[in-house]
């Protein structure tokens, strides 16, 4: 039978061992937490985030309600279409009047990837024309079985149109990412333009601001809104109640006349 001193010694020994285990657990937990807190965001993390934020169905309904003289109620829908071998994501993008979503007036492929390491930006967002736009109408609204295959999508990527270089926004700003085309823009011949510029911002809750403008040789703006970017937000659940608002109906004048000075149809 052990003595009282033996029992006390064993108790002290267990107490010390338990203390060491607790300290070890704390140290391990702290190391894991520190690793998580200090884990750096990779270049591809930025690209994936922007790609996700662009995807989905969004509307300029609120902006059109505030300022119907300068902005229309457009529907913007974007979804994944393919992925290249280097990891770049190809998105399909289209815009239409909300009342006529089956008749998009603008269709594009977006290619999203990290900026080259030598550039001071995080995400490169390029837009491309589509070889046969009729083949892709309402691509995102179809089931996957009814869409062109990813390899067909890659083969249908036509000429390069623009590239926007996005950078993570500084803390305190409303945006998450923002950027624009380089100085001088890209060639464009729509409605008397010789070049165009684009600005894009990614905000919280998957809100996207887009500002496209065209200029002539003398630097005069010939298409695009002058007041500021279009603001596209995911539709609230109550939006269906506003389906028959006058803002949602196609304009009585020819679309080209109404759009001129507000938004470009096709570059």
Image: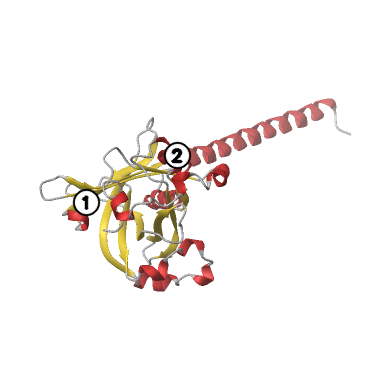
The residue that appears at 43% across and 38% down in the rendered structure is: 65
SS category of the residue bearing label 2? helix
Query: Where is mark 1, residue-wise?
Result: 196
Within 10 Å of disc 1 (Cα), the crowding (few <14, some 14-19, many 20+) is many
Query: Which coloring applies here?
Result: secondary structure
- What is the x, y in percent for residue 7? 81, 29
The residue that appears at 41% across and 67% down in the rendered structure is: 136
The residue that appears at 17% across and 54% down in the rendered structure is: 192
The residue that appears at 71% across and 30% down in the rendered structure is: 15
Q: Is residue 86 left or right of residue 144?
A: left
Residue 27 vertical placement versus 8 (above, below)? below
Camera-near label (2 vs 1) is 2
Within 10 Å of disc 2 (Cα), the crowding (few <14, some 14-19, many 20+) is some
Q: Residue furthest right?
A: 1
Name the quarter where the N terminus is drawn: top right
Residue 88 position by quadrant:
bottom left
């Amino acid at each position: 039978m052990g003595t009282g001193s033996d029992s006390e010694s064993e108790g002290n020994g267990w107490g010390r061992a338990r203390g060491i285990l607790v300290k070890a657990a704390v140290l391990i937990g702290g190391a894991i937490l520190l690793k998580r807190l200090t884990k750096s965001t990779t270049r591809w993390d930025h690209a994936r985030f922007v790609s996700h934020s662009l995807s989905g169905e969004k509307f300029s309904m609120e902006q059109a309600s505030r300022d119907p003289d300068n902005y229309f109620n457009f529907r913007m829908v974007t979804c994944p279409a393919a992925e290249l071998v280097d990891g770049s994501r190809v998105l399909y993008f289209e815009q239409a009047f909300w009342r006529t979503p089956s008749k998009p007036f603008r269709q594009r492929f977006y290619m999203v990837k990290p900026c080259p390491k030598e550039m001071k930006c995080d995400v490169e967002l390029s837009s491309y024309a589509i070889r046969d736009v009729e083949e892709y109408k309402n691509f995102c609204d179809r089931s996957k079985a009814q869409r062109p295959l990813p390899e067909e999508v890659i083969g249908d990527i036509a000429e390069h149109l623009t590239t926007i270089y996005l950078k993570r926004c500084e803390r305190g700003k409303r945006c998450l990412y923002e950027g624009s085309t380089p100085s001088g823009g890209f060639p464009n011949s729509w409605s008397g333009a010789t070049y165009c510029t684009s600005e894009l911002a990614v905000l919280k809750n998957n809100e996207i601001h887009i500002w496209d403008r065209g200029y002539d040789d003398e630097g005069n703006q010939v298409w695009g809104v002058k007041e500021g970017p279009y603001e596209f937000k995911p539709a609230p659940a109550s939006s269906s109640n506003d389906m028959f608002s006058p803002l949602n109906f196609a304009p009585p004048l020819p679309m080209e006349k109404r759009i001129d000075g507000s938004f470009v149809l096709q570059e």
